[in-house]
Amino acid sequence: VAASGGPLVYEPVIAFLHVVRRGRRPAAFLALLHTSGELRVSPGHLVFVWTAAGFRAKTASALQVGDLLMDALGQPSRVLAIRHDASTSGMFAPLTPSGTLVVDGIAASSYANAPGLHIPHGAFHALFLPVRAFYVLGLAQAKTVQALGWSDEHAEVDELHPWVHFLKEHLHLDKLLSHPHR
């Protein structure tokens, strides 16, 4: 997990924003082969890339061969190939206090964009302040996948965190942000 401006440090997982367990039906993901290994991630997930101005978050589906990912040691790792793949193992979107984590050895955001949306990491992080505040104040406890009953490999699960559900279903944030601004 990336600390602000400092070395990478461990942080606890305080919630799961989205859990997809397909059981026997495969879930699609991108497999990004890079100089340090392979990153498996959903197309909308934000990952950190090196640019001339430092590093920034970029949606995985927008990555191109040659982009420089930030690895767990804070070093660049060049994208060598991108392929579409699928797995029955499922996918999990853990939330940490900083909103960052290491996935397959690469620094990534806890957040992912829905199709058609381009919300920056910082805006997502501000949007999820209530979830992080509940955890810091001791009003909510982090739960493991097993404690949530999502560990049965044959169970069909596609569940959103209650805050994500509220933003999507009640505030219609996905529709609001996907309309062109006039």
Image: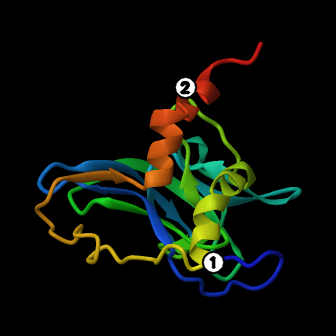
Q: Which residue is mark 2?
A: 175
Q: Position of residue 86 (x, y in %)?
A: 28, 51
Q: Quadrant of residue 119?
A: top right
Disc 1, disc 2: CB below 8 Å? no
Amino acid type at image mark 2: Lys
Looking at the rendered structure, the secondary structure element under dot 1 is helix
Residue at figure coordinates x 21%, y 50% from the top left: 26
Q: Is residue 51 left or right of residue 64?
A: right
Per the rendering, the mark at residue 112 is: none
Q: Position of residue 82 (x, y in %)?
A: 47, 50
Q: Quadrant of residue 75?
A: bottom right
The vertical placement of 53 against 152, above or below, is: above
Per the rendering, the mark at residue 136 is: 1
Extreme residue toward the right, this view = 53
Pick whichever, 122 or 106, lies toward us: 122
Residue at figure coordinates x 16%, y 48% from the top left: 25
The vertical placement of 39 against 60, above or below, is: below
Q: Position of residue 58 (x, y in %)?
A: 66, 50
Amino acid type at image mark 1: Val
Q: Is residue 132 left or right of residue 115?
A: right
